[in-house]
Amino acid sequence: MGAQPAFLVIACGALAREIVALRTLNHWPHMVVQCLPAELHNRPEKIPQAVRAKIHAARGRFASIFVAYADCGTGGLLDAVLIEEKVERIPGAHCYEFFAGSTQFAELAEAELGTFYLTDFLLQHFERLIIHGLGIDKHPELLPIYFGNYKKLSYLAQVPSEEKLAAGRVAAARLGLEFESHVTGYGELASSLAHAHTQATESIITWQN
């Protein structure tokens, strides 16, 4: 089957809402989004092969493929897969970095190394991914083991609201951490997808001609 006049974004499930919002905002009708489970954040060693499987399933079906993951704790293994597959990804070590921007995130990390970060998605699913996902609900003795070296919870807000700020404060109190928030918007996710869209558009034009 020949390539279709569309491009595929293989994304972390934690970015689905933001990517769809950017697609709508920027009028990117050729973008198709396929997500892997956000729970893979708790098993990053599984991310590279899960992404590879998605790429292989998409080969020949799309004019271009882009991966909306940072390294996400894979220790360079995801990059090794993407080099082999000749597919690009979002720059950065994790979503906190590309939402905040590399410069601002470096400043945040330098100000307090013991910071636990939440995005809109992680805040919305805090109980499921953090409390239940790490087993703290059944074994509260794990809380100081996981978070004993943290001092602060930093909420990086893509679309802020008073309700989310209140939920962030509750999450910080639940973990016994100080609370702070920063409005990041979509950060470098937006610019990375715009660049991918430009490249994909060129591929689509080539395919159509």
Image (tube, helix red, strand yellow):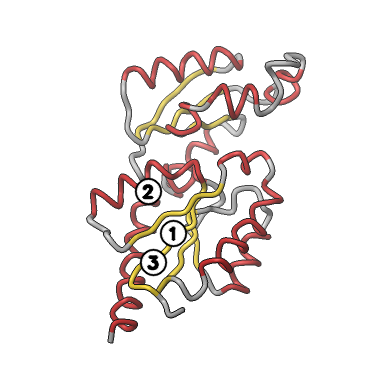
Whether pointer 1 and pointer 3 mark residues with C-beta atoms closer than 8 Å, the reply is yes
Marks 2/3: CA distance? 13 Å
Which mark is on residue 9? 1
Residue annotated with mark 3 = 7
Residue annotated with mark 2 = 19
Q: Is residue 171 above or below residue 186?
A: above
* Residue 57 image position (x, y, % from top left): 56, 66
Give the mark nearer the N terminus: 2 vs 3: 3
Name the amino acid type tagged 3: Phe
Question: Could you tell whether 58 is left or right of 147 in the image?
Answer: left
Point 63% across, 22% down: residue: 131
Q: Is residue 99 above or below residue 164?
A: below
| SS at mark 1 in the image | strand
Whether pointer 2 and pointer 1 mark residues with C-beta atoms closer than 8 Å, the reply is yes
Name the amino acid type tagged 2: Ile
* Residue 194 image position (x, y, % from top left): 32, 60
* Residue 46 image position (x, y, % from top left): 69, 51
Point 39% across, 51% down: residue: 189
Please state which of the two labelled residues, at mark 2 or mark 3, is closer to the viewer. Answer: 3
User: Dot 2, crowdedness within 10 Å: few (<14), some or many (≥20)?
Assistant: many
Marks 1/3: CA distance? 7 Å
Name the amino acid type tagged 1: Val
Of residues 17 and 53, which is closer to you in this image? 53
| SS at mark 2 in the image | helix
Q: Quadrant of residue 56?
A: bottom right
